[in-house]
Amino acid sequence: MRWSIYIVAVLLAAALDASFGSVLAIGELRGQFLPAVVVFALLSAPRKIGVRLAMLAGLVADLLAPVVLDSQEVLVVPGPRVLAFALGALAVIQLRSLLYRQNPLAGAAATLAFSLLAAVAFVFLFSMRALFLDGGAPWWPGSGAGEVWRRFLGAVGDAVVALPTLWLLGKTRPLWAFASSTRVSPGLARQGG
């Protein structure tokens, strides 16, 4: 796999999410491009680098999508999305043997699972941060449960956005240079004739 192509795709998706993402919002339902890019790479990249791929995307998401507090201060905390994306990646890596990787619906289902686990981990990590720092998470609409609901709708939006995104990324598959492995069967099955 070419890391340079992955990094460009992650940066492009994060930039689109930060600038163009609000156009795709329908009420609370807002999809993002970055989870689809991560899932596309996770479905085809070697297992041993899968979590690292997701953690890199999480770091980019943490750095390029800071939280704006009520006091109009910008809060950049590198780490929550890194760990949240790692948890989502672990789920997708386990699911990928069950999915037909070229099917966009399978990719959308994997994106939904990735985004749901990443959302739960993100809310948990910020809840723990608020607990240890004796503060709250002032950008949440009310409670942690309300934020989980909002992020659940975001995960559904991510799955919807993943359909065209994964189709488009599938057209660029030769650029990514994913290694393909073929299994060799011993015995008569491999003899030609």
Image: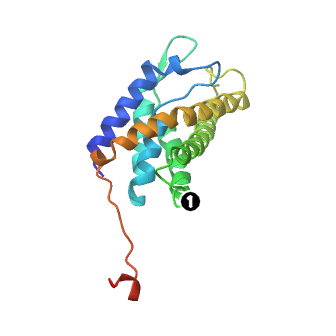
Q: Position of residue 65 (x, y in %)?
A: 45, 25
Residue at x-position 54% and y-position 58%: 94
Q: Position of residue 22 (x, y in %)?
A: 52, 18
Residue at x-position 32% and y-position 59%: 179
Most extreme residue toward the front is 193
Q: Is residue 52 above or below residue 17?
A: below
* Near-viewer residue (101 or 79): 101
Helix, strand or loop under label 1: loop
* Near-viewer residue (80 or 18): 18
Viewport quadrant of the C terminus: bottom left
Residue at x-position 55% and y-position 34%: 158
Circle 1 crowding by C-alpha within 10 Å: few under 14, some 14–19, many from 20: few
The answer to whether any part of residue 79 appears in the image is no
Apparent side of residue 169 relative to residue 132 in the rendered image (left or right):
left
Most extreme residue toward the bottom is 187
Residue designated by label 1? 98
Q: Position of residue 60 (x, y in %)?
A: 39, 34
The answer to whether any part of residue 118 appears in the image is yes
